[in-house]
Image (cartoon, helix red, strand yellow):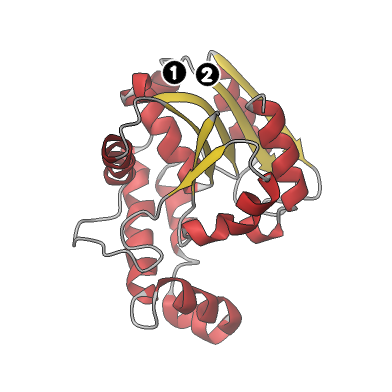
Amino acid sequence: MKEILLLHGALGSKDQFLDLEIAMGGKCKLHTLNFSGHGRRPSHHHAFTIQNFAHEVLDWMNEHYITTIDIFGYSMGGYVALWLARFYPERVGKIFTLGTKLKWNEEEAAREVKMLNPEIVVEKVPAFAQSLAARHGEHEWKSVMAKTASLMKDLAHTHLTEQDFVKINHTILLGRGGKDNMVTAEETEYVQHLLKNATSKTYPDVLHPLEKVPVELLVSEISAFFNL
C-alpha cells in the first residue's frame, strides 16, 4: 500500500488532518507528525526554521525505517517538503503542496510577521486565539506564534533560491486556492517553471486556511496525483 506523509503548516498541528484521514478511507497509509513546538509537542528549545523542521522529518523517517516517502504538504509543510527535495532528494518521492508561499524576501516576511502579534490576535480575532490555545496549550500558543514570526524573518535570508528550485527533479504539484491572500498565482507559476517536473493548479473558491478547504476536494486531488 502506498504511504504518504502529511505535513501541517505554521501554527498548525497534525490533528488538522483528522477529517482527511477519515475521508481517505484506507486508500493508502497516511502518516502525520507534529513539528516541534506544535500540537503540544515540546520544542526542545531550538528555533523554528525550515532546516530544523526538515531534519525532524528525516528523524521521523529514520525512526520508522522509511527510506523514501511521498509528501502532501500544506503551507509551511509544503515548503519543508521542497527543502527536503532540494537537499535530501533520495528521501522524498512525489510532492503535492497546497497554499505554500514560495516567494520570500524582507518585504514579504515583514508582511506576514505583522499578522503574528499575539496581543492583537487576542483583541481582534479571539476565536482564533482560542483555537490556537486549544491546539498548542493555553500558555504555549503565544510562544509558538513568536517563534513562527522568527521563522518568517529567517526565511527572508535562508529561502530556497532560483538556483535551488532548478536543481529539484521530483514530480511536484503546486496547488493554491484562488482566494488565497497569502500565496499569489505569479509566485506559484514562476517557481513551477523553474522546477523541472512540476505542474500548478488553482482551486477557484479555496481560501488559505486548511479548515476552509473542502475535504472532498483534498481526497480527489490527493488520490489523482498520487495514483491511489
Residue at 59%, 36% in the rendered image: 28
Q: How many marks?
A: 2
**Contact flag, marks 2 and 1 (Cβ < 8 Å):** yes
Q: Residue furthest left?
A: 45
**Quadrant housing the C terminus:** top right
Residue at 32%, 72% in the rendered image: 143
Q: Mark 2 sits on what residue?
A: 195
Query: Where in the figure is residue 161, as x and y percent of width and height?
Result: 40, 27
SS assignment at label 1: loop
SS assignment at label 2: loop
Write down the quadrant of residue 58 in the picture: top left
Task: Point out the tag, 2 or 1, that comes first from the N-terminus.
Answer: 1
Alpha carbon of mark 2 to alpha carbon of mark 1: how far? 6 Å
**Quadrant housing the N terminus:** top right
Given residues 206 and 12, the one toward you in this image is 12
The type of residue carrying mark 1 is: Ile
Identify the disc placed on residue 168.
Answer: 1
Q: Residue furthest right?
A: 205
